[in-house]
Image (cartoon, rainbow, N blue to C red):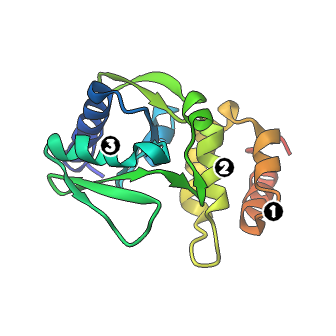
């Protein structure tokens, strides 16, 4: 992906973080851009943030006031905020679990694109990605470069414990063991 296509994603990321920060809505950067903040390849799809479930309406109002088009999809675990053709997903549940103060508190303050913002830890990011894998979506190939890039930042024991009941996640971890990416 070229810089001209990444720039709108980056701008949407910055404007979302700035608006939420200015209004005092607790949040954290999530998804592919959070992994990018930790050193993984840059996201090419959308921008993801997490907020506590009780802050959903405030966050939607803040982003609407900042010029975003707020859309409520049928899925009841997020809303979408559009800006200049870019979609920002604002999640209040991750893999069926409500975003809570503990998850947000684990976030690490990082400077990203000139803005200091909370970013979910690599272990939380990978855990949610692995637990979301199903027979309908199981793309190991696209996830491997990200895991390689952040492997030293992962709490592998915690990760294995969190995904122990998810067969696709266990298969992915078996692959990382075999490839020498994880401490098998």
For mark 1, what is the residue? 165
**Real-space Cα separation, disc 2 to disc 3, in angstroms:** 25 Å
Query: Which mark, residue 18?
Result: none
63 lies left or right of 51: left
| Residue plotted at (72% across, 61% down) | 169
- Which residue occupies the foreground of this view, 33 or 95? 95
For mark 3, what is the residue? 59
Tell me, yes or no, if residue 113 can be seen here.
no
**Residue depth check, mark 3 versus mark 1: number of the one nearer the observer:** 3
On screen, residue 104 above or below 135: above
**Real-space Cα separation, disc 1 to disc 2, in angstroms:** 12 Å
**Real-space Cα separation, disc 3 to disc 1, in angstroms:** 33 Å
Query: In the image, residue 172 lies at what x, y percent?
Result: 72, 60
User: Along the polypeptide, which appears first: circle 1 or circle 2?
Assistant: 2
> For numbered disc 3, what is the local secondary structure?
helix
Tell me, yes or no, if residue 137 can be seen here.
yes
On screen, residue 107 above or below 127: above
| Residue plotted at (53% across, 59% down) | 142
Label 1, residues with CA under 10 Å away: few <14, some 14-19, many ≥20: few
For mark 2, what is the residue? 127
Query: In the image, residue 92 lies at what x, y percent?
Result: 47, 51
Query: In the image, residue 159 lies at what x, y percent?
Result: 75, 45
| Residue plotted at (37% across, 33% down) | 25
> For numbered disc 1, what is the local secondary structure?
loop
**Residue depth check, mark 2 versus mark 3: number of the one nearer the observer:** 3
26 lies left or right of 145: left
- Which residue occupies the foreground of this view, 38 or 166? 166
Label 2, residues with CA under 10 Å away: few <14, some 14-19, many ≥20: many
**Given contact means CB atoms under 8 Å apart, are the residues at marks 3 and 1 in contact?**
no
């Amino acid at each position: 992906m070229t810089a001209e296509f990444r720039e709108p994603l980056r701008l949407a990321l910055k404007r979302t973080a700035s608006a939420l920060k200015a209004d005092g809505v607790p949040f954290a950067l999530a998804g592919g851009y959070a992994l990018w903040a930790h050193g993984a390849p840059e996201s090419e799809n959308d921008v993801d943030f997490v907020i506590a479930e009780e802050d959903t309406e405030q966050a939607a109002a803040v982003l609407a006031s900042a010029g975003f088009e707020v859309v409520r999809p049928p899925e009841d675990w997020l809303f979408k905020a559009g800006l200049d053709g870019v979609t920002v997903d604002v999640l209040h549940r991750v893999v069926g679990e409500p975003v809570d103060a503990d998850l947000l508190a684990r976030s690490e303050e990082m400077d990203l694109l000139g803005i200091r913002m909370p970013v979910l830890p690599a272990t939380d990011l990978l855990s949610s990605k692995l637990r979301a894998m199903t027979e309908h979506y199981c793309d190991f190939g696209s996830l491997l470069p990200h895991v390689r890039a952040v492997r030293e930042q992962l709490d592998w024991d915690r990760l294995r414990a969190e995904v122990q009941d998810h067969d696709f996640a266990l298969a992915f971890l078996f692959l990382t063991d075999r490839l020498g990416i994880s401490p098998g």
